[in-house]
Image (spheres, rainbow, N blue to C red):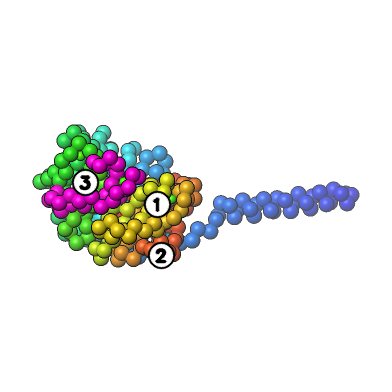
Amino acid sequence: MNAITKWEIALTILLVIIIVVFSFLATHRKIPSLDINGKIVFASSAVTLYELYLMTDNTLNISTLTNTSSTSTSPSWSPDGEKIAFASNRDENWEIYVMNADGSDQTNITNNEYGDSDPWWSPDGEHIVFFSNRDGNFEIYTMTSNGSDTVRLTNNSAIDAYPFWSPDGTKITFASDRDGNYEIYMMNTNGSDQVRITNDPASDLDASISPDGNRILFASNRTGDYEIYTMNLDGTDITNITNSRSSWDSFPCWSPDGIQVVFSSDRSGTFDLYVMDANGKNLKRLTYEVYREIYPRWSQ
Ligand SMILES: [Ca+2]
Ligand SMILES: [Ca+2]
Ligand SMILES: [Ca+2]
Ligand SMILES: [Ca+2]
């Protein structure tokens, strides 16, 4: 064997080793596992349709809650953390379902031919607010948590959608395009005193009041792409807490203690979940899937 062949063999072996090592590193990328305080339910399109998943204690501890050939999304925790309300189109049109927090006993509580979506539990656990087009266009409704005694809260030809119940139980925030584009509104839980909070030509939506009752968290595309903001309850002191231009940052949700915010962003190229302090600091990425994770909702 001459010297050149020996060198060729040595070089080939070295190249093979390098390729094997790099392939291993690429497929066994070290994903940081983060401890989270409580549990986060979220929707993910693992194949083509969204299903609900539960992340508990740390970001690698994920279990599957729904598994149907349909979409399940927009989850909301019961205040005691025992149940999850959500929307699904598994029964041919959108309905609201309630299940146990382990995914068992999935029960349709709306049962009508119209679109019903985005349930949010009242803090006393008695009621659920949601939106539906059962009266011809999208309006906000409340019902008991077993689906009885539905009450309509809004009444206009515009879209009224994406309601959240305030942690103190007295208000419902929602989005409506009744004034020409999506703005954030607040009303009493019987629909009285509907007040507009934002005033911007962009879309403002997904507004929820902080556990301490002082700030509203919301999403808006007023800079040209979606960012997450906080503001006072009267709409003053609007603060952009994502500032991630050219990425879509949305689905914001308070942590139960109000110190952090969980949200979905496509800044990595696909929608993943992130957590940060409510002032935008200490950003941490929670998911590293190639799939799309949206609608994170946090419970103790
Ligand atoms: Ca329906
Ligand atoms: Ca309406
Ligand atoms: Ca607006
Ligand atoms: Ca952005």
Which residue is at a point 19% across and 61% down the rendered structure image? 168
Quick one: label 1, few (<14), some, or many (20+) residues within 10 Å? many
Label 2 vs label 3, nearer the camera: 3
- Label 1 and label 2: CA atoms lie apart by 25 Å
Pick the front one: 34 or 203? 203
Residue at the spot of label 1: 227
Residue flagged by tag 2: what amino acid is it? Asp
Pick the front one: 198 or 282? 198
Which residue is at a point 76% across and 49% down the rendered structure image? 12
Residue at the spot of label 2: 35
Identify the mark at residue 130; answer none if there is no mark: 3
On whether ligand 4 comes within 8 Å of the CB at mark 1, the answer is yes
Label 1 vs label 3, nearer the camera: 1
User: Magenta stretch containing residue 179, yes or no?
Assistant: yes
Q: Is residue 291 visible?
A: yes
Callout 2: SS: strand
**Above or below for 190 versus 276:** above
User: Magenta stretch containing residue 161, yes or no?
Assistant: no
**Relative to residue 131, is residue 50 drawn left or right?**
right
- Label 2 and label 3: CA atoms lie apart by 32 Å
Main SS, magenta region, reads loop
Residue flagged by tag 3: what amino acid is it? Phe
Which residue is at a point 38% across and 48% down the rendered structure image? 222
Quick one: label 3, few (<14), some, or many (20+) residues within 10 Å? many
**Relative to residue 179, is residue 230 drawn left or right?**
right
Region rendered in magenta: 177-206
Q: Is residue 60 visible?
A: no
Pick the front one: 23 or 169? 169
Quadrant (top left, top right, bottom left, bottom right) of the C terminus: bottom left
**Residue 111, quarter of picture:** top left
- Label 1 and label 3: CA atoms lie apart by 24 Å
Residue 68: % across, % down: 32, 40
